[in-house]
């Protein structure tokens, strides 16, 4: 059977970076579930679908052509209908819209089956907000990463500054807090650590330190 490791947590906790590195180290498949909601946001915007049209959003979610791949240069890419939309996924507008539509029961149901289909081969590292609680409740190892709002805002600020974007750190902190509020208090699949998840606060940890910690847990669970 496919070994499954889930890595959940709020935006900016480091779960994306660590999950990709972990999947690479273990030669497992990788699922960025948050990217699916962001891709859906882009697809909806391009089709000019109203964000309140749950039925249309669910239809797009069921049929959209999305592929995760690694380029010849080793870069992780996400393709929507053959087009590389990786850079578009990281905009604040896309993230805000993704967080909004992720609260819709119909959308989450439409994407649930697609997410579970990633569990193939030797193993899967699934990164998201409800991977260990809803999508893969029987996962072999569940990790929940968190960090302070201030630290997560600083990480996002650094990332945007490096891209040449002039953004307010205070505004980013407010956005992070607002997104946490939406994700943790939504009625469907709220962001919460699974009861059997191992929680790590990454506020004062580097990505390398987090990866080493998680790798030691995979060794303990004999998942390497």
Image (spheres, rainbow, N blue to C red):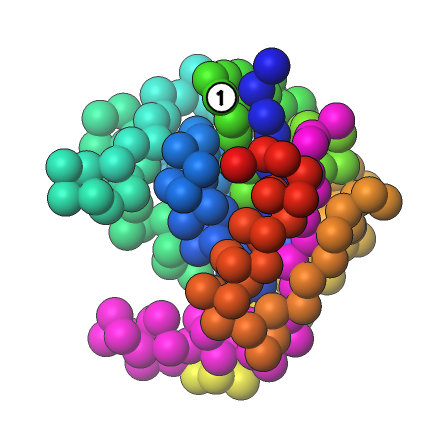
Q: Which residue is mark 1?
A: 122
Residue at x 44% of width, y 37% of height: 26
Q: Nearer the viewer, residue 198 or 158?
A: 198
Q: Is residue 157 magenta?
A: yes
On the rendered structure, is 149 left or right of 69? right
Q: Nearer the viewer, residue 141 or 15?
A: 141
Q: Is residue 217 magenta?
A: no
Residue at x 48% of width, y 83% of height: 169
Q: Position of residue 14 (x, y in %)?
A: 52, 61
Residue at x 64% of width, y 58% of height: 145
- The quadrant holding residue 45 is top left
Q: Position of residue 13 (x, y in %)?
A: 57, 63
On the rendered structure, is 9 left or right of 21? right
Residue at x 46% of width, y 17% of height: 121
Question: Which stretch did the figure color magenta?
Answer: 138-167
Is the residue 79 above or below the residue 201 in the image?
A: above
Disc 1 on helix, strand or loop? loop
- The quadrant holding residue 84 is top left
Q: For mark 1, does the 10 Å Cα neighbourhood hold few (<14), some (14 to 19), or many (20 or more) residues?
A: some
* Residue 146 visible to an observer of this rendering: yes
In the picture as drawn, the residue positioned furthest to the right comes out as 195
Q: Nearer the viewer, residue 175 or 205?
A: 205
Q: Position of residue 141 (x, y in %)?
A: 68, 38
- Callout count: 1
**Quarter of the image containing the N terminus?**
top right
Q: Position of residue 17 (x, y in %)?
A: 44, 55
* Residue 38 visible to an observer of this rendering: no
């Amino acid at each position: 059977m496919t070994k499954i490791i889930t890595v959940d947590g709020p935006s900016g906790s480091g779960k994306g970076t660590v999950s990709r590195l972990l999947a690479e180290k273990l030669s497992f498949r990788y699922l960025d579930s948050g990217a699916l909601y962001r891709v859906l946001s882009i697809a909806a915007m391009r089709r000019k679908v109203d964000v309140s049209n749950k039925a249309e959003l669910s239809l797009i979610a069921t049929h959209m052509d999305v592929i995760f791949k690694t380029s010849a240069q080793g870069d992780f890419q996400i393709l929507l209908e053959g087009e590389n939309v990786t850079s578009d996924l990281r905009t604040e507008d896309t993230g805000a819209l993704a967080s909004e539509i992720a609260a819709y029961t119909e959308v989450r149901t439409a994407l649930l089956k697609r997410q579970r289909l990633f569990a193939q081969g030797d193993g899967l590292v699934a990164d998201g907000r409800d991977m260990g609680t809803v999508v893969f409740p029987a996962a072999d190892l569940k990790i929940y990463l968190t960090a302070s709002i201030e630290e997560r805002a600083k990480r996002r600020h650094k990332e945007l500054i490096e891209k040449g974007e002039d953004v307010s750190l205070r505004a980013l902190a407010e956005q992070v807090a607002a997104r946490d509020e939406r994700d943790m208090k939504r009625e469907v699949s709220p962001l919460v650590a699974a009861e059997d998840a191992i929680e790590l606060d990454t506020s004062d940890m580097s990505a390398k330190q987090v990866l080493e910690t998680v790798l030691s847990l995979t060794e303990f669970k004999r998942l390497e």
